[in-house]
Amino acid sequence: MSTWRARLGRLFPTLVLIASALFFLLPVLSSARFALQKVPMVLLNWSNVFDGWSLRTLSQPFKEDNFWPTLSLSLKLAGGTVALTLGLLVPTALFVHLRLPKARAFVEFLTVLPYVVPPIALVAGVAAFFRPNARWYLNSEYALVPLYVVMALPFTYRSIDAGIKAIDVRTLVDASRSLGAGWVTTFRRALFPNLMSSLVSSSFLTATVVLGEFTMANTLAKRTFPTFLYEYYGLKAQSGTALALMTLIGTTALLGIFTLFTRRRGARVPTRF
């Protein structure tokens, strides 16, 4: 009886992983078939499942006039959002862990507020306040950066917080300070190498939010990559699906490469003061 329970205990997690993989992979495979195969779904059968495949739809979006300007703007917004997010959250998370551990629950509560406030409500309030008082701010192409920082808080703070919890921050800081290192040196040589993986993960999560956010950009009339993708998909559905598929595969591949790179680098670089 115990043997059967042990087998069932091992089988259930495996089934959950398989079901989760199918839940995410099947839509991706369906999108790839729609983007790369010219056979309509109603005519698809086992005899023509390998017919009509072409990579021509992958190159069509790059020829559009608005593709590169909108992609450039989204990359600028992603870079600004990542820099501002790390600049705000890393010192805050470290300060909470080292000085105010009792305030951790309150800070975590604040970071989940973007789940409560819908993006359309947030951007409507921002637009209603800044249009009569500071129109120059809304006219700036970087006006979306603070809004994206707020939207990414539930993901980025938890990634940074998990990285801090995985190491003994207080011991590293006390050891570094006792050897005469300042706070900048302590962070650069003691904390940063150990937090590299979580910082990279939070950066990519932030960039993913920026590259996929549509509501705020469309409401404030910003020509970002998601708005271009939405309009392009309405004109050319097959090429638009191919572009969305390339974006998904590209960001996933970059995340995997950088994660592997940071882990190897963190394992090789010793901590020095």
Image (spheres, helix red, strand yellow):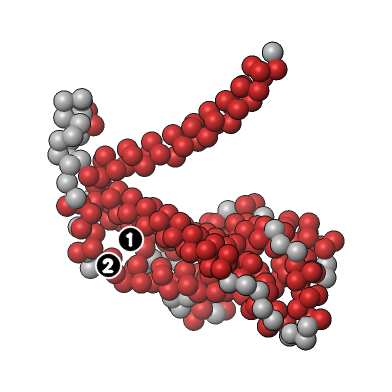
Q: Which mark is residue 66?
A: 2
Apparent side of residue 113 relative to residue 40 in the rendered image (left or right): right
Quarter of the image for the C terminus: give it.
bottom right
Contact check, label 2 and label 1, Cβ < 8 Å? yes
Q: Residue furthest right?
A: 102
> In the figure, 53 relative to 135: above or below?
above
> In the figure, 12 relative to 56: above or below?
above
Q: Residue 223, position in %: x, y?
A: 37, 67
> In the figure, 202 relative to 13: above or below?
below
Q: Nearer the viewer, residue 206 or 218?
A: 206
Q: Nearer the viewer, residue 26 or 263?
A: 263
Which badge, 2 or 1, is on the more N-terminal residue? 2
Q: Which residue is mark 1?
A: 228
- Visible in this render: residue 196? yes
Residue pictured at 73% horizontal, 56% vertical: 109
Q: Residue 256, position in %: x, y?
A: 45, 56
> In the figure, 270 relative to 168: above or below?
below
- Visible in this render: residue 146? no
* Helix, strand or loop under label 1: helix
Quarter of the image for the N terminus: give it.
top right
Q: CA distance from mark 2 to mark 1?
A: 7 Å
Amino acid at the residue labelled 1? Phe
Q: Nearer the viewer, residue 104 or 147?
A: 104
